[in-house]
Image (cartoon, grey):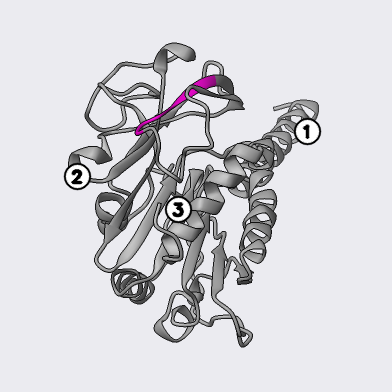
Amino acid sequence: MPRWLKLSLLSLLAVVLMTAGGMYLYFKSIGIIPSHDYETEPPVIPAFTRPAVLIFNKTNGFVHKDAIPVADEVFSQLARAQGWDVFVTDNAAVHNPDVLRKFQLVVWNNVSGDVLTAAQRDSMKQWLEGGGGWVGVHGSGGDTSYQWPWYVDTLLGAQFVGHTMDPQFQDAELQVAVPGMPITEHLPSPWTVASEEWYAFASNPRDKGYEILLTIDEDSYITYGETTSGWMAGWMDRMIGEHPLVWRHQLGQGRVFYSAIGHRPDTYALPEYQQLLSGAMRWAIGEQEQ
């Protein structure tokens, strides 16, 4: 083989390897390639003199890199406006009995992938069933890589199957499921939310007795994919019958609230959404019946 051809092939191979390496690092950084990082030593937790909120934002799956810091700040502001203390972390080792007992409310802010060890899962489950409050948004329920059936089947109550992709971000109309409820009475119905990513789930949590707060009108945006009630079959953003996006339920003595809204950082700046999240936090912490 001529020397020039060998050099050309080696140069081409180097370019291919560098490109592949760069693509791997990029996909790893945004969570397309899941991570398997688990912490076992929690951070130092300060002493609280008021009700305390733990905001947790660990990502071993897709990273909502724009939304997470904005949502952290919004949740922190909403908590402080209620006179509560706040601690923000991505260290999953906070899910142990000694740490969790310091908090009345845990917020999972766009958490993705498998983030807890078996012991941490058990601690969270016992804390919540014993009277804790939990609020989760968007990516905390929008993942197919969770390896914890209790989290999907019981805590969330539904498996994510897909979201809008063609186009990904669209305006859509949300409907208040039960008019006159304090937690949603500030919202118009329909409530038009601009330029968001809309989730679909394999089943309706209402079938498990969970309380649906907001649904989405599928006629108000472009849907894609086949309507099925089974496991993920390509990108789907449609559901059979009612299409819930926000719901809540009692879990033992604890309270669980989940909202699928919140891929874009601008959404957390909406006054209507901030008021909904504030109400969710007050309800989950048990300070206000809504």
Q: Foreground mark, 2 or 3?
A: 2
Residue under label 2: 208
Residue under label 1: 7
Of the 4 image quadrants, the one containing the N terminus is: top right
Residue under label 3: 113
Magenta segment: 172-178
Residue 246: x and y in percent read 41, 40
- Left or right, residue 78 beside residue 215: right
Q: Earlier in the sequence, mark 2 or mark 3?
A: 3
Q: Nearer the viewer, residue 286 or 22?
A: 286
Q: Residue at x 25, y 54 (%)?
A: 154
Q: Foreground mark, 1 or 2?
A: 2
Q: Foreground mark, 1 or 3?
A: 3
- Give the answer, above or below, for where 249 lies relative to 166: below
Q: In terms of secondary structure, where does tag 2 sit?
A: helix
Quadrant position of residue 238: top left
Residue 139: x and y in percent read 49, 45
